[in-house]
Amino acid sequence: MQSPQLPPYYFRVRDNGAAVFRLDTQNRQRRIEMEQIAVVNTNRGDYKAQGDYQLTADDIAAIDAWLAARCALLAQRGIDDIHRTIDQMNIATQWAQSKASDDQLEAVTDRFLLAMHDLRSVLVRKKADRINKPGD
């Protein structure tokens, strides 16, 4: 049985991006060699070659495809986190109404109220901006 073909590139994910490696298994020892060729920044949506390495058209195409897919994945995770936060707010409401002791409520009430006030202010302002947006 033949092992599956490795992809030509490996992206080591890190905070705000990835280190990009080109893989090589076509050496005498049949070992996987990894040569770092670039660094990607997902926050800025850019990348730069590692050291003096000159990125090829194939390198650039692979990095661009990875960057687009990664940004889409991070955006999806972000909205999933917000939906989970809404669920957690509902759970916190039920907890406060039915299970929380006076001491527990005292420990969290001010922080909750400030966070909810801040969130409400932002949401109301953003909604007003969307409603009043010219051209809609």
Image (cartoon, rainbow, N blue to C red):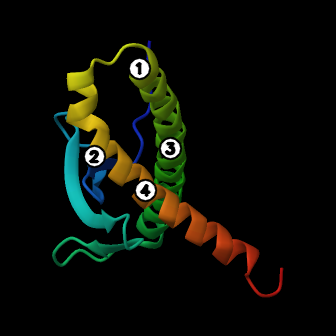
Disc with the residue nearer the chain's start (4 vs 3): 3
From the viewer's perspective, is the residue at label 2 or at label 3 nearer? Answer: 2
Q: Compared to 132, does 18 lie above or below?
A: above
Closest to the observer, 107 or 131: 107
Closest to the observer, 12 or 106: 106
Q: Residue at x 27, y 48 (%)?
A: 12
Which quarter of the picture shows residue 97? top left
Amino acid on which the number 4 mark rests in the picture: His
Q: Residue at x 74, y 81 (%)?
A: 132
Closest to the observer, 18 or 118: 118
| Marks 1/2: CA–CA distance | 16 Å
Disc with the residue nearer the chain's start (1 vs 3): 3
Q: Which element is circle 1 on?
A: helix
> Label 2: which residue?
111
Q: Judge the density around disc 4: few (<14), some (14-19), many (≥20) Cα neighbours within 10 Å.
A: few
> Label 3: which residue?
82
Amino acid on which the number 2 mark rests in the picture: Arg
> Label 1: which residue?
95
Disc with the residue nearer the chain's start (1 vs 2): 1
> Label 4: which residue?
117
